[in-house]
Amino acid sequence: MVSRVVYGRGSFNQLNEILSPKRKNAKAPFIFLVDDVFKGNAWLTSRIPLSYDDKLIYISANEEPKTSQVDELVEQIILNYKETPSGIIGIGGGTLLDLAKAVALMLTNKGEAKDYQGWDLIKNPGIYHVGIPTISGTGSEVSRTTILTGPVRKLGINSDYTPFDQVILDPELTKDVPKNQWFYTGMDCFVHCIESLNGTYLNTFSQSYGEKALELCKEIFLEDTLTEKEAADKLMMASWHGGMSIAYSQVGVAHAMSYGLGYLLGVKHGVGNCIVFEHLEEYYPEGVAMYKAMRDKHNISIPQGVCADLSDKEFDIMIDVALSLEPLWENAIGKNWKKTITREKLKALYLKM
Amino acid sequence: MVSRVVYGRGSFNQLNEILSPKRKNAKAPFIFLVDDVFKGNAWLTSRIPLSYDDKLIYISANEEPKTSQVDELVEQIILNYKETPSGIIGIGGGTLLDLAKAVALMLTNKGEAKDYQGWDLIKNPGIYHVGIPTISGTGSEVSRTTILTGPVRKLGINSDYTPFDQVILDPELTKDVPKNQWFYTGMDCFVHCIESLNGTYLNTFSQSYGEKALELCKEIFLEDTLTEKEAADKLMMASWHGGMSIAYSQVGVAHAMSYGLGYLLGVKHGVGNCIVFEHLEEYYPEGVAMYKAMRDKHNISIPQGVCADLSDKEFDIMIDVALSLEPLWENAIGKNWKKTITREKLKALYLKM
């Protein structure tokens, strides 16, 4: 689990105070990986404390994070600094947070990031890493995974060393998120809850987190009782609890199929979940009905026909990626999932999207 | 926060697997502090993995833990072993968990435990420490404090180094808790929620945890929908979430006054909370009504007249202890709490108990 967390509007201002005791020496820099939407945004960037050889690297979150991108960042850091950094700080959404976690791990584990996609393959603790979400829903701030697109699969580096050492939850940082993005990423949290609460891996620990996150999602996306600030505060907590819920159980059908879309078409995870979830009544009837009510209430349009022009070979690639995520299917359907989750079934589903 | 947690019935069986990688060498023992109600209970004790110089120390939880007790345990460990232990494992209720946390801290921080009662006085990380609750409600398994009775006050050692490095949540371990004890300790959790949710320190982080814990308490103590096992599973999670809620806000009137009772009369914390909470309608009207419904539903008798024969000097001692807990009062009443929380007011309340 995350060792330390601060919460509150304005808590981002504590960044310097939090990092200072963690600086190993003047030559061991802090590396800040920051979503490039904040380039030129002095409101945020002026509060990033840069000293000595500290480095701020802007990264676009337009594409899902890749293992090759992690390897390049690690190489760049190793080539530019004689010492291992004092820490990696990710500031952004799931893409930036996952990159920060992966870079911190790959600075202390040999080889390439793709070698560690899977469960508990990481052998050494990563360097100190801090996560600061600027959009709510992914649960990356609290999870023990970092989802990366590699040469053969889209899969996380799941390990006890993956979670952040420190998280700063400042809901004020989410104030400029565009509405569609807000909804898609919020739905990532909603889908986490539905998949966790309806999964065969569920236990009372995950259930209690999932139920709370789901309750918050309903309040945020279906009711009219909250101010904008209250809704932002609560969505940050929903993301946290939803992330905790899946960390101790597993996601399901929507995530497995969304990873297929992401791998082949580069569809971003949040909107990918929505595209898939539209068609999962068979697996999550109540969840899908609730999702559709949320979508309609907020007037969100979901891309249609993304699989319309795909070749058989392309379908096969997506289906391979989705089927490779065995724990997700086992959680969703049970031990005998292979009886009903056939290639034909998945193709029929993808064809609807 | 707690770095690692496992949850589930039977997870206690993983103890050896969890501890083995943490053994520093054959001469650095694991010290198990175990509630002496488990003496002769092979069902539990046979699963405590003792190797090399590991030591199992039985401790009575009949009295609240003391700073002097911590100092004696630390001295005993230092005198008996040439090396610092590999870890301290607390197995029991709040008393045993708090002792384990305090011993782990005092093995690496000079002086006496009483010197560290307060907030953020601990300078060095403690040694590896593991908490395994065998009764649910205290929140000690997740908190950043260890409440000790010292020579001048009852107050916690609150620090970022206090939380356990590892927690094992196995609800099966709570199966033999006597009914009164189950209720009193469960009410500790309930009172945490009421005090946190009605406090001026409340934020959305604490609120989300407190609301979930309160919802679980209502389900467990007021409804008839759960099996005994389900109720035990859920109470362990209620304790966890309730503990998280106060870790990021603060307790209030009941805890401040209960510490007074505990300090002077040695009243155990759980029942002390109940004795006090009976008379706090003025501060927590809804909470007290709900508490009374729970008490009546389970036919629990609460000690009466515990302050009947006290001298003025004794009242003064209790009042001094209660008033010294300024953050609790500020959380409960607000910055101007001194205007209404007078010595006379507290004496009048204590006289009812």
Image (tube, coloured by chain):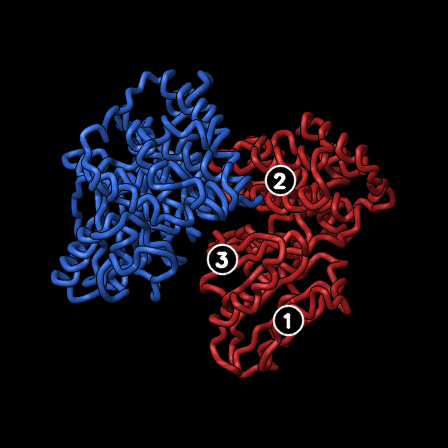
Chain colours: A blue, B red
In this orientation, does residue B319 appear? no
Circles 1 and 3 on the same chain: yes
Calculate the distance from the C-alpha at mark 2 to the C-alpha at mark 1: 29 Å
State the image quarter where residue B146 is shown.
bottom right
Distance, label 2 to label 3, CA atoms, is 24 Å
Chain letter of disc 2 in the image: B
Query: Which residue is the site of mark 2?
Result: B192
SS class of the residue under badge 1?
helix
Question: Which residue corresponds to the image point at 37% horizontal and 41% vertical from the top-left?
Answer: A342
The residue under the point 50% across, 37% down is A198
**Tag in front: 1 or 3:** 1
Contact between marks 1 and 3 (CB within 8 A): the answer is: no
Viewer-side label of 2, 1: 2
Q: Which chain's residue wears label 1?
A: B
Give the residue type at disc 1: Leu
Residue bearing the label numbered 1:
B73
Residue labelled with disc 3: B121
Q: In which quarter of the image is the C terminus of chain B?
A: top right
Marks 1/3: CA distance?
A: 20 Å
